[in-house]
Amino acid sequence: MNISEEENDFTKRVLESGEPTNDADIITYVETIHSIAKKKTTGYLKKHQVNYQQWRILKAIYLELAITPAKVSAATFTDSGTISRQLELLETKGLVKREHSKQDRRVVNLNLTAKGEHIASDGISYSESLVRCVREEIGDKKTGEFHEALIGALKCSAFSSHK
């Protein structure tokens, strides 16, 4: 899925504006990059018949960031009701299995099926291709610095309780 002509025109206007004139510009750049990446990834994932939100759930489980519905909710910044509905859909599609913990039957653990693992991995590979595009545009050093800057932003007390 390519971005629309209007979205492309907006991106051109953002690029033509030059250096950030205020802090709101930085947020606009981050939002624009996220929106484009999300839209392109959504288009790519259509071949697997999953949406972007479902892929994020698969990815969280695949990367072992979360193995319970509550942890998936936290890892994807999505409310628990939405996660429950999406997990039901993913289970119906044969991508996720829910199993009660042997230690505590109240806990539900999530596992990916082979098909779920394939889709998670394929989506990750696609998103990495988007990062390769960034790397080609700005170079390895600036990509590394950009990564470090994003980690710094996440550590900021306004975005995290890390401090």
Image (cartoon, rainbow, N blue to C red):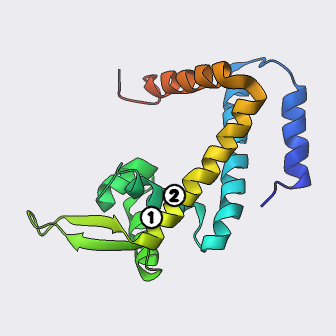
**In the image, what residue type sits under mark 1?**
Glu
- Picture coordinates of residue 113 (x, y %)? 39, 72
- Picture coordinates of residue 38 (x, y %)? 66, 52
Asked whether, in this view, residue 6 is left or right of residue 57, the answer is right
Q: Which residue is mark 1?
A: 117
Tell me where residue 22 sits by quadrant: top right
Pick the residue in front: 155 or 100: 100
The structure residue drawn at horizontal position 58% and vertical position 57%, both measured from the top left corner, is: 123
Tell me where residue 161 sits by quadrant: top left
Asked whether, in this view, residue 98 is left or right of residue 31, the answer is left
Outermost residue toward the bottom in this view: 92
- Picture coordinates of residue 108 (x, y %)? 23, 67
Asked whether, in this view, residue 116 is left or right of residue 14, the answer is left
Label 1 Cα neighbours within 10 Å, binned few <14 / some 14-19 / many ≥20: some
Q: Secondary structure at mark 1?
A: helix
Residue 28 in sight: no
Residue 9 in sight: yes
The structure residue drawn at horizontal position 12% and vertical position 69%, both measured from the top left corner, is: 105
